[in-house]
Image (cartoon, rainbow, N blue to C red):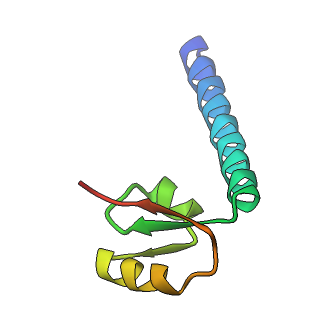
Amino acid sequence: MTGTERRNQKRRKMQETNIEQLKKEILELKEKQDAVILAHYYVDGEVQAIADYVGDSYFLSKLAIELKEQTIIFCGVS
């Protein structure tokens, strides 16, 4: 393995660690704030992966009416 390959491997590992830490923090905040995450299916897969529900705008808006959580985080598209 070359020096560049080792550096790239280390960089990827650090990014994965940062992403996992960020996911953990989001989940902790979600619980603390009594929040639910809704994500449009056009948003990035990383956002969809942490969302509680994924769908189109119509589905998510209908769903939001019935949710018990006090805070709704809507990850949409522009």
Relative horizontal placement of residue 62, taking residue 37 as reference (left or right): left
Residue appearing at x 63%, y 41% in the figure: 19
**Residue drawn at the location 63% of the way across and 80% of the way down:** 68
Whole-percent x, y for residue 60 in the image: 40, 78
**Which quarter shows the C terminus?**
bottom left
Q: Can you give x and y, in whole percent of width and height, for residue 59 in the image?
A: 36, 83
Image vertical order of residue 15 relative to residue 58, above or below: above
Q: Position of residue 58 (x, y in %)?
A: 30, 81
Q: Residue furthest left?
A: 78
Seen at 55% across and 65% down, the residue is 51
Q: In which quarter of the image is residue 62?
A: bottom left
Can you say whether 32 is above or below 39 in the image? above
Q: Nearer the viewer, residue 35 or 8?
A: 35
In the drawing, does residue 40 fall left or right of residue 1?
Answer: left
Residue 27 placement: quadrant:
bottom right
Can residue 44 be seen?
Answer: yes
On screen, residue 48 versus residue 52, left or right, reads left
Q: Quadrant of the N terminus?
A: top right
Instruction: Judge whether 59 appears above or below 53 on screen.
Output: below
